[in-house]
Image (spheres, helix red, strand yellow):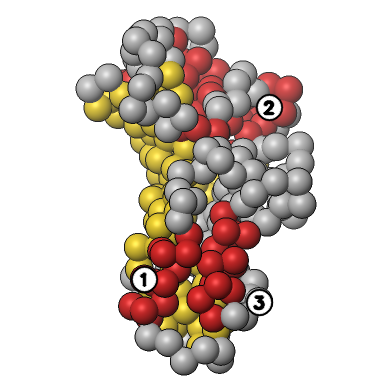
Amino acid sequence: MTRFALTLEFDGTPFFGLQRQAHGPSVQQAVEEAIHATTGETITLHAAGRTDAGVHALGMRVHADVAKDIAPFRLMEALNHHLRPNPIAVLDCVVVPDDWHARFSCVGREYLYRIANRRAPLTLDANRAWQVPQPLDAEAMHRAAQALVGRHDFTTFRSVHCQAQSPEKTLDLLSVERAGQEVHIRAAARSFLHHQVRSMVGCLALVGMGRWREEQVGEALAARDRQALGLNAPSEGLYFVRALYPDD
């Protein structure tokens, strides 16, 4: 049995999330079926993170144990063939030690959130960015975001369906910058709560629109109450950028 680590890029629009679902298509199901078509084996895919419906990935790390004797490059090529027409691509495939785990060996995760700050309808970026037509003050958003950096109780920014044992997380980075007609929010931490990034982005957007004072983001955090959340940003602007491991 060989353990392969794969790096996936995918458009989350047609999926009900990364994790296999009983009520609709998932990224996990598509990759597991591609592996079965390649090897004849029924395997379980393990991922560095779980993404909601509509969330995208630039570099999601996953692993699978395969009995078939096959080189990493051949496996990658075969999976990309069988994944068509799903909007999923295997960017990299390597053999890893048997004790390497895509989720449990991961020591850091990074996300990007794209806001298309323009009035004209989205064409090329439809379903790939959150369109906010009102002018956004990215500098004010960045200043407000710094209240969330560090170790905190993120109950306010946590989905009521979150299964994490504790609402406490350490946020290593939360930055906001303008890139032309887009505003990019980057977040990095060892791990995140369910909806944490989208909830933080929604409140920062309220600051950018002038509907919230900069200090209200910190006040919402201190409230430790989901009712204090101003806005949960939609899924289409969120991208899982990469997972970090001790050897990276």
Report if residue 140 is visible in the image. no
Q: Find disc 1 in the rendering and name its residue.
A: 77
Note whether residue 22 is visible.
Answer: yes
User: At 52% from the left edge and 89% from the top edge, which residue is drawn?
Assistant: 68
List the residue tagged with mark 2.
223
Q: Amino acid at mark 3?
A: Thr
Q: CA distance from mark 3 to mark 1?
A: 19 Å
Which three-letter amino acid code belongs to the residue tagged 1?
Answer: Glu
- Residue 141, image x and y in percent? 40, 22
* Mark 2, secondary structure of its residue: helix
Disc on the earlier residue, 2 or 3: 3
Q: Which image quarter holds the C terminus?
A: bottom left
> In terms of depth relative to the viewer, which is nearer, 126 or 40?
40
| Displayed quadrant of residue 146 | top left
Q: Are marks 2 and 3 in contact (CB under 8 Å)?
A: no
Label 3: state its secondary structure: loop
Foreground residue, 145 or 96?
Answer: 96
Label 3 neighbour load within 10 Å: few <14, some 14-19, many 20+? few
Q: Residue sitting at 57 percent across and 59 percent down? A: 30
Asked if the residue under mark 1 is in contact with the one under mark 2, i.e. CB atoms within 8 Å, the reply is no
Query: Can you say which quadrant of the picture contains the N terminus?
Result: bottom right
* Lower sequence index among marks 2 and 1: 1
Report the residue marked by disc 3.
42
Q: Relative to 221, is 69 above or below?
A: below
Q: Work out whether 66 lies above or below 192.
A: below
